[in-house]
Image (cartoon, rainbow, N blue to C red):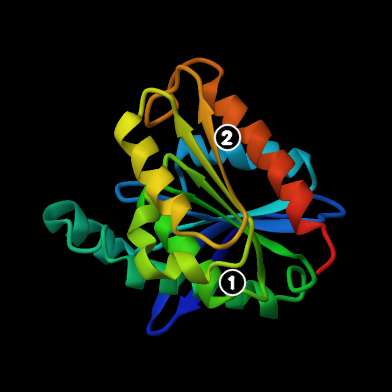
Amino acid sequence: MAVSIPAGEHVLEGDLRVPPDAVGLVIFAHGSGSSRFSSRNGAVARTLEQSRLATLLLDLLTSREEAEDGRSGEYRFDIELLSGRVIAAVDWAGEDAVLKHLPIALFGASTGAAAALMAAAGRPAQVRAVISRGGRPDLASAALRRVEAPTLLIVGSRDTEVIELNRRAMAKMIAPADLVIIPGASHLFEEPGTLERVAAIASDFCIQHVTRLR
C-alpha cells in the first residue's frame, strides 16, 4: 500500500505492508542512489513479512532532491537530513491507527544505516532494534554513543573496507552491538544465497528484539 508521510514542509513516499497479526514494524532507510523500489531491500522485506513483521520501505528524499542528488551528490551524505526523515516516519507510525501499537525496528543500508542509528538515538523509546546491511554506521558519528537499541551490523566478507568501518563504529557504541560477516558476499550481496542469509538473520534479530518487554 502506498503511503505519504509528512516530513516538515516535504512529503515522503513509502510502501507499507502489514501482514495479519503483525508483531512489529520495520522501517527501511535506503542508501544513496536507491529508493523504496530497491530489489534487495524488497527481498529482505518479504522475508520479514513472513515472520509477521510489517514493513515500510521509504524514500528519504523527494523526487526533486533525488534528481539533484544524482547530479551533485548534495544530499547523500547529509545524515542529519536523512535521519530527520527517518524520525518523521517513526513519529508518523506512532500516530497511525494500524501501526501505533507495533514496536519498531529500523533497517538501514549504506548511508541509510547511519540515518537509522541517528534516528534511534533521537527516538530511544520507540526504536527497539537497528539493523545495518553493508552500512556506514561510522557516519552517525557522536550519535553512536546515544543509541540504546540493540544493533546488528551485517557486512559481506569481501567488503573489507566497510568491515573495518563497522568495527570502528561498533567500538564507540554503548548499546549491545554485533557484527555478522557473510562469507563470500560483496558490498551489494549479489552473490547467490547471500541476500537470503541477510534476510534470515535480520528476521531472527527483529523477532528477538521487537517483541521483548521493555
- Mark 1 is on which residue type? Val
Left or right: 99 with respect to 162?
right
Residue 196 image offset from top left, x and y in percent:
60, 26
Q: Nearer the viewer, mark 2 or mark 1?
A: 1
In which image quadrant can residue 25 be found?
bottom right
Q: From this view, report whether residue 188 is shown above or below residue 118.
A: above
Residue on which disc 1 sits:
90
Identity of the amino acid at label 2? Ala
In the depicted view, which residue is nearer to us: 5 or 147?
A: 147
| Residue 127 lies in quadrant | bottom right
Q: Please tell me which residue is depicted at 71% across the width and 49% down the height of the picture.
A: 206
169 or 159: nearer the eye? 169
Task: List x then y, in percent, for residue 77.
Answer: 26, 60
Q: Earlier in the sequence, mark 2 or mark 1?
A: 2
Which residue is at 37% across, 23% downward? 158
The residue under label 2 is 43
In the image, taking residue 141 as reference, residue 194 lies left or right, namely right
Q: Nearer the viewer, residue 53 or 116?
A: 116
Secondary structure of the residue carrying tag 1 is helix
Q: CA distance from mark 2 to mark 1?
A: 22 Å
Return the x and y of residue 139 as percentages of the image width and height: 33, 58
Answer left or right for 188 relative to 5. left
